[in-house]
Image: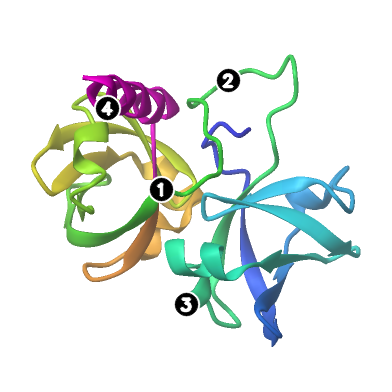
Amino acid sequence: MFTGIVEEIGTVAGIRMEKDVQRMTVGAQAVLDDLKIGDSISIDGACHTVVALNAESFDVESVQETLARTTLGGLRQGSRVNLERPLKVGDRLGGHFVMGHVDGKGRVAERRMLEESAVFRIDLPESLSPLVAEKGSVTVDGISLTVVDVGADFFTFSAIPHTLEATTLSERQPGDGVNLEVDMVARYLKRLLAGDEAEV
């Protein structure tokens, strides 16, 4: 489990396909501290398992389901990614509970710069729209954000200067794909309500 507070921007050092699995090497610094093989790590909001590790980078593997549901299949050598290690028991919860289970891909529809902050409009799949609430929490590329407005097929959020500087949001432009994870409470409520309807 994560918090959506990005610790570091890593850089993709290499990507290769091994049969039906994508193996990716990510260069990093801060997150390597106390990281071990077998640990979980969030890459642009998608939880992965560290399968190899050295002093400058770590490796993860992505199966076809992950590549289809997230933007990770479109990464290239040199791509920058948001990184976060899992929440430790007793840590402060600065963002919100993030599972690292991406619900789907959205697309940046608009980026409006103000003096130092920015307002983003994200187009999202119709299936996720009911799960995103005004002033609720949403995760975009692993970043915990507060929804400003929501419509039938979009939502907006504001990014403060620190968030722009500390994450890859500074690079996101209209047309770019992003990974979305809705608040987990909304996800389970939807499932519960669907069960109730099925019993009627």
The stretch drawn in magenta includes residue 55 = no
Label 4: which residue?
A: 198
Q: Callout 1: 10 Å neighbours few (<14), some, many (20+)?
A: some
Membership of 199 in magenta stretch: yes
Instruction: Give the labeled residue for mark 2.
Output: 93
Q: Position of residue 48 (x, y in %)?
A: 68, 54
Residue 44 image position (x, y, % from top left): 52, 55
Instruction: Categorize mark 2 by other alpha carbons within 10 Å: few (<14), some (14-19), many (20+).
Output: some
Residue found 28% across the figure and 21% down from its top: 199
20 displayed left or right of 135: right
Bounds of the magenta segment: 181-200
* Residue at the disc numbered 3: 74
Q: Which residue is mark 1?
A: 103
Residue type beneath disc 1: Asp
Query: Quick check: 77 above or below 172?
Result: below
- Magenta part, dominant SS: helix
Please say if the residues under marks 2 and 3 sit with CB atoms less than 8 Å apart. no
Q: Amino acid at mark 4?
A: Ala
Whole-angstrom CA distance, mark 2 to mark 4, is 36 Å
